[in-house]
Image (cartoon, grey):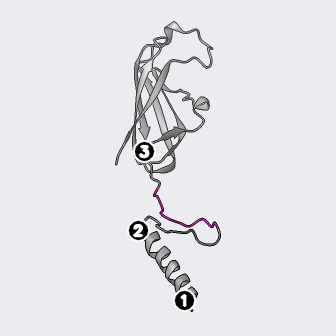
């Protein structure tokens, strides 16, 4: 009876001390069994990320609207872990002088997740005199996409 009472007391002592984050015994239990003593939380800081899918395949092809006006758009897939606002800027190569502009067609606010965004470009007062007629695939500008978190 005394041995059983001692065993119950030892187990109770283990339970009480394990809760406090430490174990103090004169003897380890009969078998060398691992005993839980504490739990440590693991935390991390998650950064922002934005990814434009298939960037190398994106291209805006300008089509003639009138004698000196050309415009075009392309669809771009955006993946992000935060809501963002997109904007654009355009830089002409100088091969076809004119007034260049670019924009996001539709909402520039992209929610967290995957979204399709339409990016457009336009040139007005295009001066075609510096490029031979019949030229195809001539790069005349580059549109740069910029992003900023909205939250």
Density class for disc 1 (Cα within 10 Å; few <14, some 14-19, many ≥20) is: few
Q: Earlier in the sequence, mark 1 or mark 2?
A: 1
Label placed on residue 145: none
Instruction: Please indicate whether residue 10 sits to the left or right of residue 137 in the image.
Output: left
Residue under label 3, please give it: 106
The picture places residue 83, in percent across and down from the top left corner, at: 41, 48
Q: Residue furthest left?
A: 151
Instruction: Please indicate whether residue 63 sits to the left or right of residue 22 in the image.
Output: right
Q: CA gap, disc 3 to disc 1?
A: 82 Å
From what the image shows, is residue 129 above or below residue 37?
A: above
Q: CA gap, disc 1 to disc 2?
A: 27 Å
Query: Which of the 4 image quadrants contains residue 41?
Result: bottom left
Q: Residue at x 46, y 26 (%)?
A: 143
Residue under label 1, please give it: 2
Density class for disc 2 (Cα within 10 Å; few <14, some 14-19, many ≥20) is: few
Residue under label 2, please give it: 20
Which mark is nearer the camera, 2 or 3?
Answer: 2
Q: How many marks?
A: 3
Residue sitting nearer the eye, 3 or 47: 3
Q: Residue at x 53, y 87 (%)?
A: 5
Q: Residue furthest front?
A: 2
Write down the region rendered in magenta: 32-41
Q: Secondary structure at mark 2?
A: loop
The picture places residue 141, in percent across and down from the top left corner, at: 48, 20
Answer whether residue 100 is magenta in the image.
no
Q: Earlier in the sequence, mark 2 or mark 3?
A: 2
Which mark is nearer the camera, 3 or 1?
Answer: 1
Residue sitting nearer the eye, 58 or 128: 58
Q: Earlier in the sequence, mark 3 or mark 1?
A: 1
Instruction: Please indicate whether residue 75 sits to the left or right of residue 33 in the image.
Output: left
Name the magenta segment's main secondary structure: loop
Q: Secondary structure at mark 3?
A: loop
């Amino acid at each position: 009876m005394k041995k059983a009472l001692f065993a119950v007391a030892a187990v109770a002592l283990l339970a009480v001390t394990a809760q406090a984050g430490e174990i103090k015994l004169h003897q380890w239990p009969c078998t060398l069994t691992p005993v839980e003593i504490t739990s440590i939380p693991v935390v991390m800081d998650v950064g922002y990320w934005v990814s434009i899918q298939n960037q190398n395949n994106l291209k805006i092809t300008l089509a003639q609207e009138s004698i000196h006006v050309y415009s075009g758009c392309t669809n771009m897939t955006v993946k992000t872990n935060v809501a963002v606002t997109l904007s654009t800027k355009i830089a002409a190569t100088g091969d076809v002088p004119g007034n260049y502009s670019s924009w996001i067609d539709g909402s520039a606010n992209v929610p967290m997740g995957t979204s399709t965004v339409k990016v457009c470009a336009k040139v007005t007062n295009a001066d075609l005199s510096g490029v031979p007629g019949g030229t195809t695939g001539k790069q005349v500008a580059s549109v740069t996409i910029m992003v900023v978190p909205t939250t």
